[in-house]
Image (cartoon, rainbow, N blue to C red):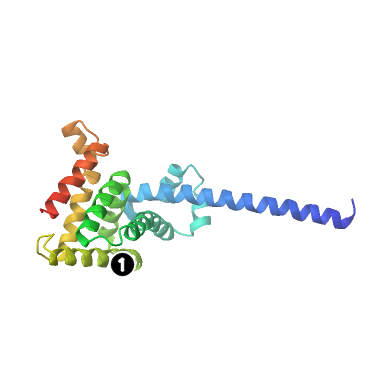
Amino acid sequence: MDDFAAKTEGAGALRGVRPARQRRSRETQDKIVTAALAVFADRGFEGASTHEIAEVAGINQPLILYHFGSKERLWQAAAERILDRFLDGWRQRVEWLEGLGSAARLKIMLADFVTFTTEHPELFQFLIEANKRGDFQLSALVESRLRPYFEFICGEIEEAQSAGAMPPGNPAVLHYAMIGAGAALSALGTEFKMLTGVAADDPEVVEAQADAITRLFFPD
């Protein structure tokens, strides 16, 4: 084999190795963020340790610093992961519901929220812990991700109120009342099952919760 052929073969081998390494790197990052989200949701930022996160992820602790640099950046990545997962679905739903009235859109989005928080209880738990800190990290999330959602929902509530489809009141307060009602079983699922013998994520329970909340905020 001449030098040119050897070099060409070597370059081809390298091109095959790099995508594999990149794929493994992405898989490792995904494992770390998934584990971090669970641990941060359970223990908050201060109570979580990179050692515990590494154990949950099944990786060596130094890999966390290698991929994310610090616990703060890992927290940010976990926050963006769960919020983007929710908000991406919400944006798609908004597009699909174009042409419906505000009350009809809100009812469907409220049911979506109940379903999502039941399937992903870490969303509400994570935000509860983040609110306890209330630092610049939460401020960044509010401005980049939560404010657009908040302003859209409040606008929908105002339109529904004008049409007589929702009770009067501060739209922001109503919005958070809906959040609290929608995430209640997600947050108290263990207690609910102890009292009723039924899992909070049982499809019939989720449907009944969404229906009860809809009747509460849309009495007509």
Q: Nearer the viewer, residue 82 or 40?
A: 82
Q: Secondary structure at mark 1?
A: helix
The outermost residue toward the top is 197
Q: Nearer the viewer, residue 136 or 47?
A: 136
The residue positioned 33% from the left and 67% from the top of the image is 136
The residue positioned 15% from the left and 62% from the top of the image is 173
User: Relative to 200, does residue 22 appear above or below in the rendering?
Assistant: below
The outermost residue toward the front is 99
Identity, as a three-letter code, of the amino acid under mark 1: Pro
Q: Residue 169 lies in what quarter of the image? A: bottom left
Q: Is residue 39 left or right of residue 205?
A: right
The residue positioned 13% from the left and 49% from the top of the image is 215
Picture coordinates of residue 146, whole percent (x, y)? 30, 63
Residue designated by label 1:
148
Number of residue marks: 1
User: Relative to 99, does residue 206 appear above or below in the rendering?
Assistant: above
Q: Is residue 146 left or right of residue 60?
A: left
Q: Nearer the viewer, residue 89 or 199?
A: 89
Picture coordinates of residue 5, whole percent (x, y)? 85, 54
For the C terminus, the image quarter is bottom left
Q: Nearer the viewer, residue 154 or 104?
A: 104
Disc 1 residue crowd, few under 14, some 14–19, many 20+, Cα 10 Å: few
Picture coordinates of residue 9, whole percent (x, y)? 79, 52
User: Relative to 89, does residue 196 appear above or below in the rendering?
Assistant: above
The outermost residue toward the right is 2
